[in-house]
Every structure is written in structure tokens, then in C-alpha cells.
Amino acid sequence: MSEKITKEQRSRNMRAIKSQSKLENKVSKALWNKGFRFRKNAKMFGRPDISIKKYKIVIFIDSCFWHSCPIHRNMPKSNQDYWTKKLARNVSRDQEVNQYYLENGWKLMRIWEHELKQDFEATIDSIAEFIKMAAVAK
């Protein structure tokens, strides 16, 4: 079933999307409560959701829609040319960001939105373990 929404309504909906999601804030709070100290959305290349410069760690929490999750990829029915280009550019930008950090000796982790929704605690534990291991490897 296709959506019956005008261009103006779609535009208003898209403008309402914030740079930080509730899920990202929930992850940040959980990690902070575990004793990790970091910066959120630091003005660094690619705007990592979480960064720890001291240990050269960056963590990205990727939305299944905006980053074209291979499991939950969903293409809007209207204006498909625009969305195909937009989402493909997001994916290529993610690859550029990954390459930049890896070439510069940073430890990088990407988490899919669906991983957090399936098992939040286990995903937080894996992020915590990643930070501990990356900090030791410094």
C-alpha cells in the first residue's frame, strides 16, 4: 500500500528528524553509567556518535533506513530516483569515513539500529568490550 502524503508533508516530516536519536541517547546513557567517558557527536570527520580521542576510538550507530541496512533496507515508493541516489551516497560516505579512520590508526565500530533493538544489553556489553580492548591496544 503506497502512502498518500503530499510533498509538503513529506518535507515537513524529514525536517523534523533530529541529528541525535533517542536510541543514541539511550546508548550514551548506558555507556556513561558503565563508567566510560566520551564525546557525543564531536566535530570530527563523519561526526561519530561516540568518540574517545585519547584512545582513538570512534563508534557510529547507524539507522537501518538512512544507512541502507542489508537486512532492513526499505526504499520509499515515491520519488525513487532521489532516494536511490540519497541512500547510495550515504553508504559511500560511510565507506569514506571508515577508510579515513582506519588509515589514520583509529579503532572504529559500527552498530546497526536493529542490533540495539533486538538485544540492547548484549549490544551495550559488546560496545563496552570493544572500548576496553581498543583502550588496551593503544
Image (tube, rainbow, N blue to C red):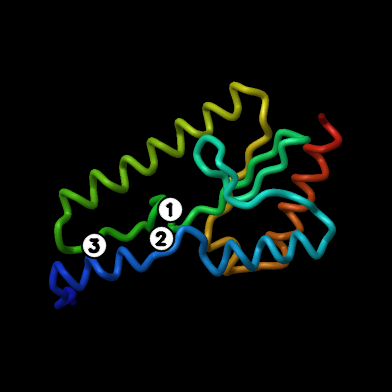
In the rendered image, the quadrant that contains the C terminus is top right
Q: Amino acid at mark 3?
A: Pro
Residue at 56 percent of width and 37 percent of height: 44
Q: Residue farthest to the front?
A: 43
Q: Mark 2 = which residue?
A: 72
**Is 38 situated above or below 118?**
above
The residue that label 3 is drawn on is: 76
Seen from the viewer's position, the closer of residues 70 and 49 is 49
Q: Classify mark 1: helix, strand or loop.
A: loop
Q: Which residue is mark 1?
A: 69
Q: Based on the displayed image, in which of its 4 quarters is residue 80 positioned?
A: bottom left
Residue at the (38%, 58%) spot, across then down: 65
- Label 2–label 1 contact, CB within 8 A: yes
Q: Position of residue 124 (x, y in %)?
A: 71, 60
Q: Secondary structure at mark 3?
A: loop
Quadrant hosting residue 118: bottom right
- Quadrant of the rendered image containing residue 55: top right
Residue drawn at x 17%, y 74% is 2
Q: For the residue marked with disc 1, what is the amino acid?
A: Cys
Q: Secondary structure at mark 2?
A: loop
